Amino acid sequence: MSHSQTRPSPVGPPKLTARPAGPGPAKGWCVPKQQATDAQLQSNINYVCSHGVDCKPIQLGGACYNPNNARAHATYAMNTFYQDKGRQP
C-alpha cells in the first residue's frame, strides 16, 4: 500500500465492498468481496481506522501486518469494525 498520495476521507461507510461471511444467522466474520479493488479496500481501511478501530496490528511491525496487502489488511480492519459494532453490517 502506498501512502504517497493523499486520499480524501470518505463521508460515510464505503459501499458494496464488505459482506458478512458464511450463510445463515451465525455469521461470524466480515470479509471483503472478491471483486473489491485495492482502492475500495484501502477506502474501507481508511474509514474504519478513522472510526474507532485500533489499526495498529496492521501497521508496520504489527501482529497482523503480514501478509502486507490491501485484502489482508482490509479483512482485519473490516472484521474488527464488524465485531465492534455488534455484528451490524
Image (tube, helix red, strand yellow):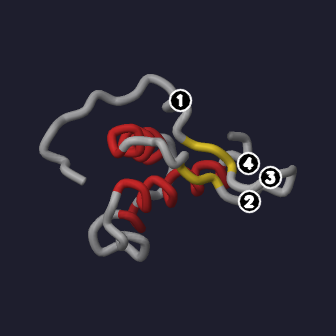
| Residue 56 coordinates in the image, percent (x, y) | 39, 63
Q: Earlier in the sequence, mark 3 or mark 1?
A: 1
Q: Residues within 10 Å of mark 2 (few under 14, many from 20)?
A: some
Dividing the picture into quadrants, the one containing residue 46 is top left
Question: For mark 4, what is the residue?
Answer: 87
Q: Horizontally, is 6 left or right of 30 in the view?
A: left
Lower position in the chain sequence, tag 1 or tag 2: 1
| Mark 1, other Cα within 10 Å: few <14 / some 14–19 / many ≥20 | few
Q: What residue would you read off at disc 1?
A: 15
Q: From the image, tell me which residue sits under label 2.
A: 28
**Residue 32: % across, % down:** 53, 49
In the image, what residue occupies the spot 43% across and 62% down?
72
- Looking at the image, is mark 2 or mark 4 nearer the viewer? 2
* Mark 1 vs mark 2, CA separation in Å: 20 Å
Question: Could you tell me if the residues under marks 4 and 3 are in contact, i.e. CB atoms within 8 Å?
Answer: no
Give the SS element for disc 3: loop
Q: Earlier in the sequence, mark 2 or mark 4?
A: 2
Q: Which mark is residue 77?
A: none
